[in-house]
């Protein structure tokens, strides 16, 4: 019930955001269109005046205007040069306005679109459905699952330090073949990371396009090229990309279990654990507190020497429940359910 309530609230929020964004886009486009028309009218007006000045200069230099003096001709040439400079400035201002508009709104559209897709992905179900075996495990009592050994509650120990905590699924234990299990990144985490990686690059793409146009349009000294918008887009893209790379690289332990070698490999801890050194597996429920509190679930590996290590932790209790059952059956180790 709570999960569906959250989904309805997210859907309402998305609808409100889309409506507000559509209104803002319409208003901004109207203002931009008016500004562009104003620039175009000013440019056309000054081009007309420039054409008239050139016509006067032509008449003065060909003798058609008999009362023109050399001073009049020099004055006309100066006015024509000034008019050319002014028109170029107006055209650059119009181009800068267009570039700024495209950078802001294409950037916002890409950023908005990626996060909306992430929200819709959550609403439609972030992970594929459970397999038939997993469904049976969820519907059965633990003691009725064939091959599963349950350890007495008295053998539980303090929870191992969790590698990370999250209020959504960050990883799953998947079989890469019949002899190996591996902790892999969840689809929710992957899409969230991609959202951070892709969302700021709409604005950067616009700036790269205009930079390419400047470089291929003719030789322009670097100091005369417009770098403000480009640097602004780069500075926005850097923190978003760093967060995305962090999510891609540190969401799970990337642990591997090999039944032929009877070895548990934990790359993050830089250690290998023999199956024979494992006493039991334990499912913990940990309360994570901060701005808000939530229950974080953990698969803990208990060793014969009294040490314990964390294999996987996240907030989806059903996924982590079937994952610890799969791991216990794979390693043939007792399971402690706290």
Image (spheres, grey):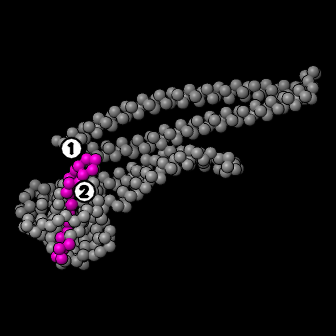
Whether residue 58 can be seen here:
no
In the rendered image, residue 289 lying in the magenta stretch gets the answer: yes
Q: Which residues are magenta?
A: 286-307
The x, y position of residue 113, in whole percent, is 40, 42
Q: Residue at x 13, y 56 (%)?
A: 138
Apparent side of residue 332 relative to residue 124 in the rendered image (left or right): left
Q: Residues within 10 Å of mark 2 (few under 14, many from 20)?
A: many
- Locate residue 320, reporting x and y percent: 20, 58
Residue shown at the point (49%, 30%) measured from the top left: 28
Looking at the image, which is closer to me, 20 or 125? 20
Q: Is residue 215 left or right of residue 279?
A: right
In which image quadrant can residue 60 be found? top right
Q: Which mark is residue 152?
A: none
Q: Secondary structure at mark 1?
A: helix
Assign a secondary structure to mark 2. Answer: strand
Instruction: Point out which mark residue 314 bears.
Output: 2
Q: Which mark is residue 3?
A: 1
């Amino acid at each position: 019930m709570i999960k569906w309530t959250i989904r309805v609230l997210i859907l309402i929020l998305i609808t409100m955001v889309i409506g507000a964004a559509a209104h803002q886009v319409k208003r901004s486009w109207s203002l931009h269109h008016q500004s562009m028309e104003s620039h175009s009218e000013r440019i056309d007006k000054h081009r007309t005046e420039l054409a008239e000045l050139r016509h006067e200069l032509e008449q003065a230099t060909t003798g058609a205007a008999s009362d023109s003096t050399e001073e009049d001709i020099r004055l006309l040439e100066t006015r024509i040069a000034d008019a050319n400079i002014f028109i170029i400035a107006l055209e650059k201002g119009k181009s800068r306005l267009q570039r700024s508009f495209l950078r802001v709104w294409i950037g916002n559209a890409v950023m908005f679109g990626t996060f909306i897709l992430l929200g819709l992905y959550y609403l439609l179900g972030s992970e594929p459905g459970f397999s038939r075996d997993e469904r049976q495990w969820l519907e059965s009592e633990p003691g009725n699952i064939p091959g599963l050994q349950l350890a007495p509650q008295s053998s539980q120990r303090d929870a191992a330090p969790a590698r990370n905590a999250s209020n959504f699924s960050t990883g799953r234990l998947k079989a890469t073949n019949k002899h190996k299990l591996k902790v892999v990144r969840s689809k929710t985490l992957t899409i969230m990371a991609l959202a951070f990686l892709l969302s700021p690059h709409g604005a950067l793409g616009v700036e790269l396009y205009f930079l390419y146009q400047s470089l291929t349009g003719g030789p322009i000294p670097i100091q005369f090229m417009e770098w403000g918008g480009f640097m602004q887009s780069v500075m926005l893209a850097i923190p978003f990309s760093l967060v995305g790379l962090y999510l891609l690289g540190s969401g799970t332990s990337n642990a591997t279990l090999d039944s032929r070698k009877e070895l548990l490999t934990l790359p993050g801890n830089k250690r290998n654990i023999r199956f024979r050194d494992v006493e039991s597996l334990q499912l913990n429920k940990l309360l994570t507190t901060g701005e808000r509190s939530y229950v974080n679930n953990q698969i803990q590996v208990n060793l014969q020497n009294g040490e314990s290590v964390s294999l996987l932790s996240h907030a989806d209790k059903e996924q982590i429940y079937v994952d610890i059952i799969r791991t216990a059956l794979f390693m043939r180790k007792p399971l402690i359910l706290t």
